[in-house]
Amino acid sequence: MADHNALPLVILAEKFASLPGIGMKSAQRLAYHVMSMDMQSVEEFAQALIDAKKNVRCCSVCQNLTEREVCPICSDEGRDRSVVCVVESPKDVTAFERTREYAGVYHVLHGLLSPMDGITPDKLRIRELLARISQGGVEEVIMATNPTVEGDATALYIANLLKPLGVKVSRLAFGLPVGGILEYADEVTLFKALENRNYM
Amino acid sequence: MADHNALPLVILAEKFASLPGIGMKSAQRLAYHVMSMDMQSVEEFAQALIDAKKNVRCCSVCQNLTEREVCPICSDEGRDRSVVCVVESPKDVTAFERTREYAGVYHVLHGLLSPMDGITPDKLRIRELLARISQGGVEEVIMATNPTVEGDATALYIANLLKPLGVKVSRLAFGLPVGGILEYADEVTLFKALENRNYM
């Protein structure tokens, strides 16, 4: 914004623009929107930022974000602790929980291997996963990272570390999305669907 | 977000989702991003929200957002106070200032007439504009609202109020955008460009 703009507005717009996926134009629009909110709503927004940062931490077991030392899923006696689903981020836990079909527990890596971007194994919560599996009681680890280069590489890397520990390691199935149209599926997906076909 | 998510994160995501143009998915992503920021950055963000709301107000002359009683443009002795450019929002002032060609002053309406949405003349800063023009010294008022139904209606409404005050009222020119391609111009724009043609 040009220098005729009020400084606090310029600063606020820059803060919004520092968030992922928000450009300078949107950030300016959001800053103006804040001006139209009442003071109480603005204070609640500011407090929500502080509260989230201050009161949310990683679960000491699965590394998912939680307010407690151990998250509700890890503390739930009804969950099957012998199956651990390894995911990239807390968003993925939300996605699996929406299916209401998965009864095991999770492990959140907080990223995927990407050496070009400086994301090496020590940047992810792999050490915590190995420590957890070493304690015993886990029979299967499901690698549920995205079907991308980074997701596949991370799954393979971790699988190789886990196998010597005598635990079963599986990978999510790749195939046609349910409700999808065969004609529009890409070649790789279609090949995977063919390769992993189930006999009826 | 499902209830296994940490409550402060859910609250923060809802705050982001209450902003215009941010859906629940993006809001969740932004809330997770805040978790990855350091505490100082989060506190600065929260403070920027409060500061903008607390320290920014409307210029007592032109109604643009500013930290001072009278904004830098209105206090600038070098600006031509006999020409007032009437715009919808502070964003439009920024757009005109970017041209570096306009030497007059502004009046910010903070909206456009839209009776269907409950935006009647008393909701805009029209009263302030009339008071300002009545004080004398203004020779021309340029209606610089958007070339939309609401923008045109607002310009016409204000023009009719201003004419009895003996002030010249003009409207921004409509025509082909500079650098635009004739073939892709819509019919109305092309018609306006033809109608307002300049003799060479």
Image (cartoon, coloured by chain):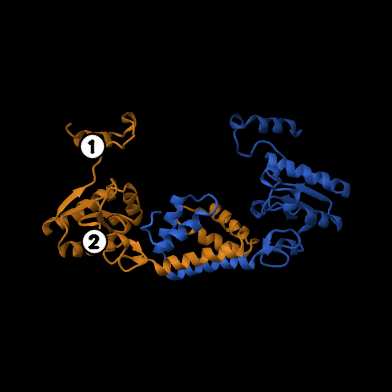
Chain colours: A orange, B blue
Q: Badge 1: how crowded within 10 Å, few (<14), some, or many (20+)?
A: some
Same chain, labels 2 and 1? yes
What residue is pinned by disc 1?
A: A192
Where residue B75 appears, as percent x and y from the top left, is: 74, 64
Front residue of this view, candidates B62 and B15: B15
Q: Badge 2: how crowded within 10 Å, few (<14), some, or many (20+)?
A: many
Where residue A68 appears, as percent x and y from the top left, is: 34, 67
Say which residue appears at 83% left-offset and 48% top-offset.
Answer: B162
Q: How far apart are marks 2 and 1 (CA)?
A: 28 Å
Can you say whether A103 is above or below A176 in the image? below
Residue A7 in sight in this render: no
| Total number of numbered discs in the rendering | 2
Indicate left or right for B139 with B61 as reference: right
Q: Quadrant of residue A38?
A: bottom right
Q: Do the residues labelled 2 and 1 touch (CB within 8 Å)?
A: no
Q: In which quarter of the image is the C terminus of chain B?
A: top right
* Subunit of label 1: A
Determine whether the residue tagged by mark 1 lies in a helix, strand or loop.
helix
Q: Which residue lies furthest to the front in this view?
A: A78
Where residue B18 appears, as percent x and y from the top left, is: 53, 54
Where residue B115 appears, as percent x and y from the top left, is: 71, 44
What residue is pinned by disc 2?
A: A126
Q: In which quarter of the image is residue A72?
A: bottom left
Say which residue appears at 79% left-offset and 46% top-offset.
Answer: B158
Say which residue appears at 43% left-offset and 65% top-offset.
Answer: A52
* Subunit of label 2: A
- Circle on res. A49: none
- Mark 1: amino acid: Lys
Front residue of this view, candidates B96 and A62: A62
Q: Quadrant of the N terminus of chain B?
A: bottom left
For marks 2 and 1, the one nearer the N-term is: 2
Residue A96 in sight in this render: yes
